[in-house]
Amino acid sequence: MVVPSYLKSFQALELALRTGSLRGAADILSITPAAVGQRIKTLEDYLGIDLVVRGRSGLRPTPALSDALPHLSRAFIELAAAAEALDFQRFNDIQIAANSDWVELWLLPRLPEFRAAFPNTRFCINGEGDAPLRLGQTDVEVSFGPRRQDARHAPLFADFLIPISSPENAARIGRLRGDRLEGFPLLHLDFYCNDPSAIGWPEWVAAHGHRASAAARGIRFQRIASGLEAVLSNAGLMICGLALVAERLAAGAIVLPFSPRTGVWTAWTFQARFRHESSRGGPVARFRDWLEAEAGATRRTLAELAGSPPPSDR
């Protein structure tokens, strides 16, 4: 019998095959695709057989796994049902799977306000917190992607992309003449790269000037938080969405070295997807009301900074 420590490996395997990719499983589990692959490999090493192969349509089971796969799928369906049945024992627990930048930069600074109003609520966010991780579905999933139009999705806010810098670097730029960014370090953020409306430094420079060459050069960051730390340490300028850094802008930790007219709205939005059963009442419903109110305040702040609301709100 395979010991219980391999349950997460079985879960990763079943989700990877159900979604057809390591990425699909990673999005559900809120871990990286590499971590999903490692969990599957751990199980393969334990059993001494290959379990998945990559085909044109995605991942598929090997012949060695084919007979066992239906049992594996039914097992996780039953585990999810058991978790649902036991939810009443953790009525005040809220399980959240969310983009890590959104959690770190936007949610966590605001969460004490919600906790003060509802002190008995416990959270498990991306597998960590004062509530234990649930085997079944999460109550709330927050992502950045194309806007969805259905009752289970609550659009939170689009983002407004514009160059940001530290106050020190903004002062240096102000003292330069002509092509004010020539030779100046530019930082590149890949977080928004799949958004059809997003811009990077090459597009911004082409539209607004201030530099004659090498607009594509510089350090690249996958996460907003990492790029923000570089900006705060005077490493360079970065085109970033203001939704998750507006409080730092208001506090003066970062500034806008150029006019808001040089910024653009994203087509994608941060949005929350609620499990249907979880949104009917109780703590999750209260959290949804609070989340939508806080998101509304963020939308108003961004519209004021940008000088106009996003196209979807006009």
Image: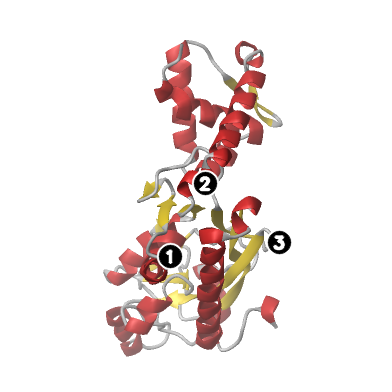
Residue 259, compared with residue 16, is above or below; it is: below
Give the Cα distance between marks 3 and 1. 22 Å
* Callout in the foreground (2, 3): 2
- Secondary structure category for the residue under label 1: helix
- Tell me which label, 3 or 1, sits earlier in the chain: 1
Q: Quadrant of residue 230?
A: bottom left
* Callout in the foreground (3, 1): 3
Q: Residues within 10 Å of mark 3 (few under 14, many from 20)?
A: few
- The percent position of residue 155, horizontal first and vertical second, equals 62, 67
Residue tagged 2: 88
- Tell me which label, 2 or 3, sits earlier in the chain: 2
Residue 198, compared with residue 88, is above or below; it is: below
Three-letter amino acid code of the residue under disc 3: Ala
Three-letter amino acid code of the residue under disc 2: Phe
Relative side of 233 to 22, left or right: left
Residue 49, compared with residue 95, is above or below; it is: above
Q: Viewer-proximal residue, 227 or 269? A: 269
- The percent position of residue 175, horizontal first and vertical second, equals 31, 89
- The percent position of residue 92, horizontal first and vertical second, equals 46, 55
Report the residue at 49% width, 55% height from top: 99
Residue 6 makes an appearance in the image: yes
Q: How is the image coloured?
A: secondary structure
Residue tagged 1: 107
> Mark 1 near mark 2, Cβ–Cβ under 8 Å?
no
Q: Quadrant of residue 303?
A: bottom right
Residue tagged 3: 151
> Mark 3 near mark 1, Cβ–Cβ under 8 Å?
no
